[in-house]
Amino acid sequence: MALHPMSPLDAAWFHMDGPANRAMVTGLLLTTKPLDFVQVRAQIGQRITAFERFRQRVVERGLAVPVPYWQDVEPFDPDLHLHHVALPAPRNAKALTAFIADIASTRLDPAQPLWQVHLVERVDRGSALVMRLHHCLADGTAMMGVMSRLFDPVPTSRRRAAPVSAGLARPQPAPAASMVDHAVQLVAGAGMLLQELLKQDDPPSPLKGEFGPRQQVGWSRPVAIADVKAIGARHGAKVNDVLVACFTGALRGYLRRRGVDVDHTTVRAMVPVDLRSAERIGELGNEFGLVILDLAVTSSRRAQRLALTKARMDALKHSAEPVAMKLLLDLFGRTPKVVEDAATDLFGAKASLVMTNVAGPRETLSLAGVPVDRAMFWVPHPGRQLGLGASILSYAGTATMAVISDAHLVPDPEEITRRFDREFEAMARDPEATTTTA
């Protein structure tokens, strides 16, 4: 079977798996009407074959330094990746959460292409579609392109919404740069990476420690993007600023309950920054860098926390750090896994979690003729240092915060998402108030 080179960036993410913590993305779609498995299997099975990477597995070749390649699977059978299941009684949200946690804790079959779909029937009166794939196949922006091809606009939609970039802090567009400009940017980025390495590691907290074999998940209620914008307008803040500030307040309350002195601590997040060029829109693979965001967990007042969040995220938008980090990941993708593991530990020690935002379709999509009412995903927190992943996905006018964690360190991520719900409601009412500690 034919072999195809894997890009160094994709190879870096393939090797990012930790002993118990894999670089696997898990997604969830919810419908209020039941999905028909035969129709779903036919639609996804037919359309997924258009993407070469979903018909290829990963193999490694080389004795001294194994190098990952894409290998065609022939014959390719999409039915091996499409599963039909039902929740155990009482078939409620708790049962669905337990099922997703089990799926997120299970390794994908390395002998097959690294993706899988489960149709879960009788979720309330509708269905759930749980999808997972290894991060080496695609980043958030690329997956929105896949989503737009696998699904259809609902009949009332006038047009299909184009996928939008992923990441909390996409760099500001700049005019075409010369080789000298690129060199200056690279040097500046390298200097910023050095500054990050010289910072103290994130202190001990419930988000740091020895990982166990299981993951746990939680998700928030949907919040209307129009309401998020209304909050932001009062403070000159963007949608991302408001949602990150709400999550930070939720995390502050959670850590305080777990015994952390939140007024005198540091919690940083690894944040993806979309760097996909215009000519690569629509392609699979990974095209992003990373920055380290200092979350404003020490701020007790919501307005102050929002202001600090906005200022720090604005600074990241003009930073050369993501470009330098992308080049560093490109370098790691050319080295043995043991080298990348050491570098991942080094940078991972400076943060406690991964946090990302993906702007999904603005209009409602359908699958097998059934509208998709809600969509969310869980970003991986790979390696051995980052105990939690927080994801924001906007879809059809709403946004959902989803949290995945190492179950040994954070056994109750749903407590964080419940606090996110309360933080958003409180900010909509009175952004000046002090954070609730209940």
Image (cartoon, grey):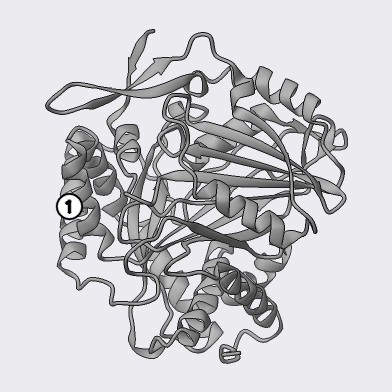
Percent x, y for residue 278?
46, 31
- Residue 20 appears in the figure: yes
The structure residue drawn at horizontal position 87% and vertical position 44%, both measured from the top left corner, is 33
Residue 358: image location, x then y, percent: 55, 49
Above or below, 168 relative to 278: below
Few, some or many residues within 10 Å of mark 1 (<14, 14–19, 20+): many
* Left or right: 421 in relation to 345: right
Q: Which residue is mark 1?
A: 190
249 vs 210: above or below: below
Q: Quadrant of the C terminus?
A: bottom right
In the image, taking residue 429 as reference, residue 195 lies left or right, namely left
Q: Residue at x 53, y 32 (%)?
A: 115
Residue at the image point whose x is 75% and y is 52% from the top: 88
388 lies left or right of 228? left
Check the image and report above or below for 60 versus 268.
Answer: above
Q: Nearer the viewer, residue 216 or 266?
A: 216
Determine which quarter of the picture holds residue 23.
Answer: top left
Tally of numbered discs? 1
Identify which amino acid the numbered label 1 is placed on: Ala
Can you name the residue that lies furthest to the left here? Answer: 64
Compared with 26, 236 (above or below) is below
Quadrant of the drawing holding the N terminus: top left
